[in-house]
Amino acid sequence: MDIVNLGAQLNAGTIWPEAVLLVTILVILVGDLIQGRSSSAWTPYAAMAGGLGAVAALVLQWSMANPIGFLGAFNADDLSIVFRGIIALSAVVTVPMAIRYVEQSGTSLAEFLVILLTATFGGMFLSGASELVMIFVALETLSISSYLLTGYMKRDPRSNEAALKYLLIGAASSAIFLYGSSLLYGLSGGETRLGAIAANIVSDGTDAPIGLVVALVFVIAGIAFKIAAVPFHQWTPDVYEGSPTPVVAFLSVGSKTAGFALAIRLLVTAFPLVSEQWHFVFTALAVLSMVLGNVVALAQTSMKRLLAYSSIGQAGFLMIGLVVGTDAGYASMLYYLLVYLFMNLGGFTCVILFSLRTGTDQISEYAGLYQKDPLLTLGLSICLLSLGGIPPMAGFFGKIYIFWAGWQSGAYGLVLVGLVTSVISIYYYIRVIKMMVVKEPQEMSDVVKNYPEIRWDLPGLRPMQVSLILAVVATSLAGILSNPLFTIANQAVTQTPMLQSPAAQVAIAPVSLEVQN
């Protein structure tokens, strides 16, 4: 193969967004090394610029003529572009959340940002990887960076405990996933590309090979850990409670998005012979996640643990789109992940602002907050109402699209479970809002009574305020603009060849849910 043909086969233009992130990482590393920790105030802006530059590169990649790169190991199709864009945006929104938090802990902000961008880099590669080796390398890049972020506050025993639990369970999960991948490699006769694996695995015409079923079990276990699906969710509450809150915010969106991207690409491409089996398994995971996540959240007294169990329930809602397996199902997943990015990160921004001033995240301590900090109360209320699916917030339209796609495909039981658990989730979200707004002055918590004076001129707080305002505005506008956003998501799905099976042709008509301005 000559150099020209090799360059065409590699098609390095497919990873321009990841290259932008890599350059940003090197700039921050070298710049911080030269200038020292005391002169690294520019690093957050460099990190955000790198993330936005990656998003801009993704926009330019839309509908590429040749999206296949690196000899078939990476796919920059429109589906991966949307997933990679969500992951990059989650990092951009997380950066201003972390400035004040990390500086207050006395650790290096530049090092934190480098690890965060490395996790983003791994998640973006994972979203487009279509070859087993690249999938595993990207998965480990994301996972190891996540472990480092979780234990970044090395002087905090809770952060150390969370990182250790995350590392032990994550290592076991990675080993299980790797074993399933090795079975696929063997069954396919030494193939690592997902499409070739499916083509090389043959059945006797009645049943799939038993080895393929075993591989499916191990692969699903690894994916379920990454998206925090029940019963692979045990790490989530403890890690969310003990980790630095900006890290939790990123993991709840960025890591989960990468997990769903991996699930779609790997299951649809490599496991067509056992599609009924993996649909059944994810139906069970979706029901368990929706029920346990939303029911257990009712008993939580910590905001971070409440949002942890909420994220488990949200994963259950998203899995309905995966189980449905239609254009409408996949498109509704993309739309819901996009709006989940803003409403969930907005909620975590409010939790960070409150904990920075008070040193606590207990729900009972929010009592009467409206009287001392109306902006924070309004922002948190809007994000929680959207998470609960209250109209006209973006979360309402996200759930409508997912439930309607499920109803169209005949998954009536799954949709009914989703509706019931959505009602349950509204209760514990409203409970927090009521605690902040409805309480009488004499019932105000001692923490709020001693609430410090709000000073937005402190370093790191103004970017966080801007981040909160943008998240709240995006959460509100994403509901009004639900129709065009869903159209983009639907276009990404319909232009992705691997999803265009006969079962994927039932499409939802976004005009039926159009919101008039």
Image (spheres, rainbow, N blue to C red):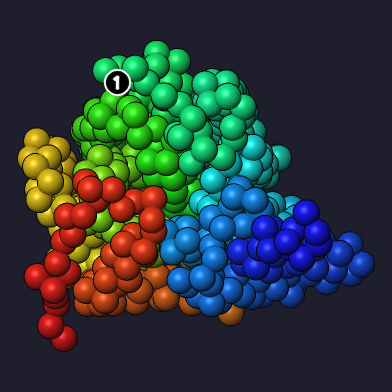
Query: Along the horizontal axis of the image, is 114 left or right of 93?
Result: right
Using the rendered view, name the quadrant where residue 306 is placed.
Answer: top left
Residue at x-position 31% and y-position 62%: 494
- Please tell me whether residue 326 is drawn above or below residue 464 in the rendered image: above
Residue situated in front as seen by the camera: 331 or 365: 331
Quadrant where the C terminus lies? Answer: bottom left
Q: Residue at x 37, y 21 (%)?
A: 203
Tell me residue 52's x, y (percent): 58, 74
Disc 1 crowd rating (10 Å Cα; few below 14, some 14-19, many 20+) is few
Q: Quadrant of residue 437?
A: bottom left
At mark 1, the secondary structure is loop
Q: Is residue 155 above or below residue 37?
A: above
The residue sitting at 26% across, 76% down in the picture is: 484
Q: Position of residue 117 (x, y in %)?
A: 65, 58
Q: Where, by quadrant of the figure, is residue 392 drawn?
A: bottom left
Which residue is situated farthest in the right direction here? 34
Residue 338, percent from left and from top: 37, 62
Quarter of the image where the N terminus is located:
bottom right
Looking at this view, name the residue that lies furthest to the top: 210
Q: Is residue 393 visible?
A: yes
What's under tag 1, amino acid-wise?
A: Gly
Q: Is residue 398 left or right of residue 169?
A: left
Residue at mark 1:
205
Compared to 114, does 177 lie above or below? above
